[in-house]
Image (spheres, rainbow, N blue to C red):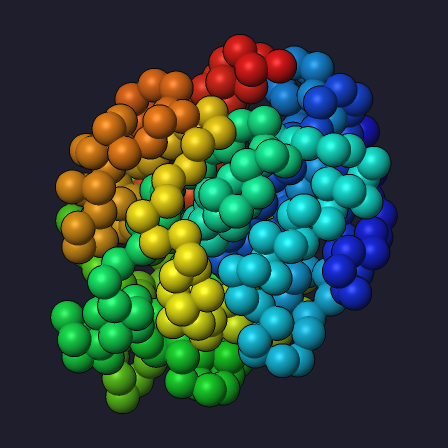
Amino acid sequence: MVAHRMVDVNGIRLHIAEEGTGPLVVLLHGFPESWRSWHHQFAPLTAAGFRVVAPDQRGYGRSDRPEDVAAYSILHLVGDVVGLIRALGEEQAYVVGHDWGAPVAWHTALLRPDLVLGVAGLSVPPPFRGPEPPLVTMEKRFGGRFYWNWFNRPGVADAEFAADTRTALRKFIASASGDAPGEVEQPLVDLERGWLATMPDPGTLPEWFTEQDLDALTESFSGGFTGALNWYRNLDRNWELTAPWDGAVVTPPSLYVYGDRDLVPAFPGTPELIARLPELMPGLRREPIRLAGCGHWTQQERPAEVNAALVEFLTALA
């Protein structure tokens, strides 16, 4: 059974879900999610002999939500993973992340390769620092309509999403799912009406995401969206903070999995990056795994394929 408790890490308290014994595997969720986005992975990974821990990351769910926007930088987020490994009584761990959790996992492997036995990223590929701050790039390309820039308007997206949390989350899940109709497009915002105005409200949820899943996710955002949105408000700060690692690559054994209907791998320049990963990533254990028909919510949409890939990857290293 999955157990829950609070852990003190780096001056804050993180809620974690944990199960199993053996080598530690830390599962890091993305936006707008919680530890529960990994509920399909617990049983297969524990059955394979691993201790599985999935936190609500800072700003999410039952974990603490610091008020200072700067407290959500990539260095703080990596620090939480490092502190969590130590708090769990371990010296090293395997780190797996999806969406925003993937950059945290990749950067943990980049900044602290001594602690990372292996790293896997879902949806978001490994970090390669661009020539200018990312918000500047997206502002130029999309005239302020890209959702990263929208999220950086203080209080705006916070209020938009909190006005009807359940509807906002239902729209997020459905619109980024592989089941969504139409072509995969960049998530551009109507600057007058907001982001949710551009998303259709689905009559039904995807088969893989139940009303009970939506209930649990809605409850996890009962405290609002500001903590989660503060991650995006550090994008340019992260670009500055990671300058010492410009040109560095992730060296621990690694795995990358993504869906061909995921909007993130379709970002400008990302398809070319994915194609070059085998030459850029010395630790990459196999070609990136591309899941046909899969949208953004990789481990929830395609749990069987993701579980098989993770078990194969992790057991080969254990």
Q: In the figure, residue 141 lies in which quadrant?
A: bottom left
- Residue 21, quarter of picture: top right
- Observer-nearest residue: 105 or 145? 105
Q: Quadrant of the C terminus?
A: top right
Q: Nearer the viewer, residue 97 or 81?
A: 81
Q: Residue furthest top?
A: 316
Q: Looking at the image, is 311 positioned above or below residue 178? A: above
Above or below, 175 against 133 in this view is above
One can see residue 114 in this view: yes
In the picture as drawn, the residue positioned furthest to the front comes out as 244
At 67% from the left and 42% from the top, the residue drawn is: 54
Where is residue 294, by image quadrant?
top left
Question: x, y (%) of residue 281?
Answer: 33, 31
Residue 295 percent across, percent down from the top left: 33, 42
Number of callouts in the render? 0
Question: Which residue sits at x=30%, y=69%?
Answer: 133
Q: Nearer the viewer, residue 74 or 270?
A: 74
With 157 as the anchor, is 187 left or right in this view? left
Q: Position of residue 195 (x, y in %)?
A: 33, 74
Is 50 situated above or below 162? Answer: above
Reply above or below: 313 against 196.
Answer: above
State the residue at coordinates (59%, 57%): 77
Q: Is residue 168 left or right of residue 128?
A: right
* Residue 39 visible somewhere in the drawing: no
Give the x, y percent position of residue 282.
35, 27
The N terminus - image quarter: top right
